[in-house]
């Protein structure tokens, strides 16, 4: 099985063979030797060879090569049952956190708050925004680098996604209204991926993009993305953001109609509305590129989905109380299980914890299976996904957002 997988992935990377296919071949020197052995993980200070991206990638400027100062994240600290909340619920099976660096977290968070002030999001609640610590989340979730600029990028992108969630989808106090959500999201997509010029209509679009801080934020984060990423990475982030927005329209319809979806339906929507989206930044923040074919390889895709869904269940566990309090309560797996099963919240939490642990164990198994693939970028990316789950867990337990 492992050999078959290694061979299949190698084929993906080296491209088709036969008459007329040479132009379609994706060269990748790193995948030249199919092997079933586990490729070594990057060492604490990567060699120059590791820092060189595959030939098809956009070569990053020298300043983006991994910094020799990097402290953590190049190893797996393993998985464990971790206590969470007030410690009274069953533990979450989760990776251990690879790096906690409070100084770096403060630096990234301070810069993020300055950026938020500049773009105008959370204008009258910047202290709360500071305590939320999306900058700290970026540092915890991307232990692979301690370069401030890519970490700040991750912090901006997540903050901008969350701003669209808070202002458009979730928080009635911030003006979120189900019927306005779809046209607002359509504009967010234009802010990330500018449509072709259409004369005076583009001028009107431009006015609209400048008038709304959420759109200013998302456009600014997307500009930062374009500075750090290659074209296929940029389109990966745009496409995955937009698929997340499709799920948001489902929640908006349920809110508008005052309906609660069954748990299975909510989970189906959550598949594309999870921290999977945040995890797709991992190679960009790390300063390398995971080949688009490898990223999309079904087993890799499933592994990242398992991790993203597990991480978003952690979010639902921490945010259940806050979400129940809104005039139009959000969808939340704990609240939905309690409703559907007619069980006490405690029991619903236990079911959600079991579900989370099932996904993490699934990711761990996928990671083991994929260890046979001879791609250093893939191994690095999967370690990054593991790091993201751990960082997300750590952040949810400490942010002011769910207190
Ligand atoms: C970072 C990111 C992709 C943010 C957009 C919002 C989202 C998909 C989440 C993962 C969080 O979901 P939720 O809306 O339940 O989050 P809060 O509980 O409001 O923080």
Image (cartoon, rainbow, N blue to C red):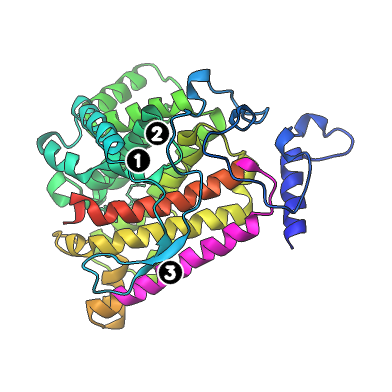
For the point 89% across and 35% down, which residue is it?
19
Circle 3: is it few (<14), some (14-19), or many (20+) Cα within 10 Å?
A: some
Q: Using the numbered discs, state the Cα–Cα distance from disc 1 to disc 2 in whole angstroms.
A: 8 Å
Q: Residue furthest bottom?
A: 342
The residue at which mark 3 appears reads as 357
Per the image, label 2 sits on a secondary structure element best described as loop
Can you say which quadrant of the picture contains the N terminus? bottom right
Residue in front for this viewpoint, 342 or 89: 89
Q: Using the numbered discs, state the Cα–Cα distance from disc 2 to disc 3 in whole angstroms.
A: 29 Å
CB under 8 Å between discs 2 and 3: no
Residue 23 has which mark? none
Q: Earlier in the sequence, mark 2 or mark 3?
A: 2
Q: Using the numbered discs, state the Cα–Cα distance from disc 1 to disc 3 in whole angstroms.
A: 24 Å
Figure check: 385 above or below 212: below
Where is residue 114 drawn, in percent x and y? 21, 27
119 with respect to 306 (left or right)? left
Extent of the magenta region: 349-376
Q: Is residue 117 visible?
A: yes
CB under 8 Å between discs 1 and 2: yes
Where is residue 375 drawn, in percent x and y? 66, 43
The residue at which mark 2 appears reads as 146
In reply to whether residue 117 is colored magenta, the answer given is no
Q: Earlier in the sequence, mark 1 or mark 2?
A: 1
Determine the image quadrant of residue 214.
Answer: top left
Figure check: 19 above or below 384: above
The residue at which mark 1 appears reads as 139
């Amino acid at each position: 099985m492992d050999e078959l997988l290694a061979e299949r992935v190698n084929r993906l990377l080296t491209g088709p063979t036969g008459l007329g296919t040479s132009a379609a071949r994706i060269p990748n020197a790193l995948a030249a030797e199919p092997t079933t052995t586990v490729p070594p993980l990057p060492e604490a200070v990567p060699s120059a060879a590791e820092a060189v991206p595959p030939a098809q990638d956009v070569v990053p400027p020298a300043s983006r090569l991994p910094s020799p100062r990097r402290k953590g994240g190049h190893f797996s600290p393993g998985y464990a049952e971790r206590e969470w909340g007030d410690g009274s619920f069953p533990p979450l099976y989760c990776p251990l956190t690879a790096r906690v660096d409070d100084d770096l977290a403060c630096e990234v968070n301070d810069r993020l708050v300055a950026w938020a002030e500049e773009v105008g999001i959370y204008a009258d609640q910047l202290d709360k925004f500071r305590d939320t610590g999306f900058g700290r989340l970026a540092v915890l979730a991307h232990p692979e680098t301690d370069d401030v600029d890519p970490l700040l990028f991750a912090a901006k992108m997540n903050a901008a996604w969350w701003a669209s969630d808070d202002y458009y989808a979730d928080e009635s106090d911030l003006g979120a209204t189900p019927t306005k959500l779809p046209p607002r999201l359509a504009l967010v997509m234009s802010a990330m991926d500018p449509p072709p010029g259409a004369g005076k209509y583009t001028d009107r679009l431009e006015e609209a993009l400048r008038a709304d801080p959420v759109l200013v934020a998302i456009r600014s984060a997307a500009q930062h993305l374009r500075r750090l990423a290659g074209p296929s990475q940029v389109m990966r982030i745009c496409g995955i953001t937009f698929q997340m927005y499709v799920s948001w329209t489902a929640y908006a319809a349920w809110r508008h109609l005052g309906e609660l979806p069954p748990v299975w339906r909510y989970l189906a929507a959550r598949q594309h509305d999870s921290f999977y989206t945040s995890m797709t930044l991992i190679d960009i923040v790390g300063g390398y590129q995971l080949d688009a074919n490898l990223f999309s390889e079904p087993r890799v895709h499933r592994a990242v989905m398992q991790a993203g869904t597990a991480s978003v269940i952690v979010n639902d566990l921490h945010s259940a109380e806050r979400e129940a309090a809104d005039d139009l309560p959000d969808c939340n797996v704990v609240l939905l299980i309690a409703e559907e099963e007619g069980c006490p919240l405690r029991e619903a939490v236990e079911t959600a914890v079991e579900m989370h642990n099932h996904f993490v164990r699934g990711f761990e198994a996928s990671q083991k299976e994929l260890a046979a693939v001879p791609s250093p970028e893939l191994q690095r990316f999967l370690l990054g996904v593991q790091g993201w789950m751990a960082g997300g867990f750590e952040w949810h337990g400490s942010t002011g957002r769910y207190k």
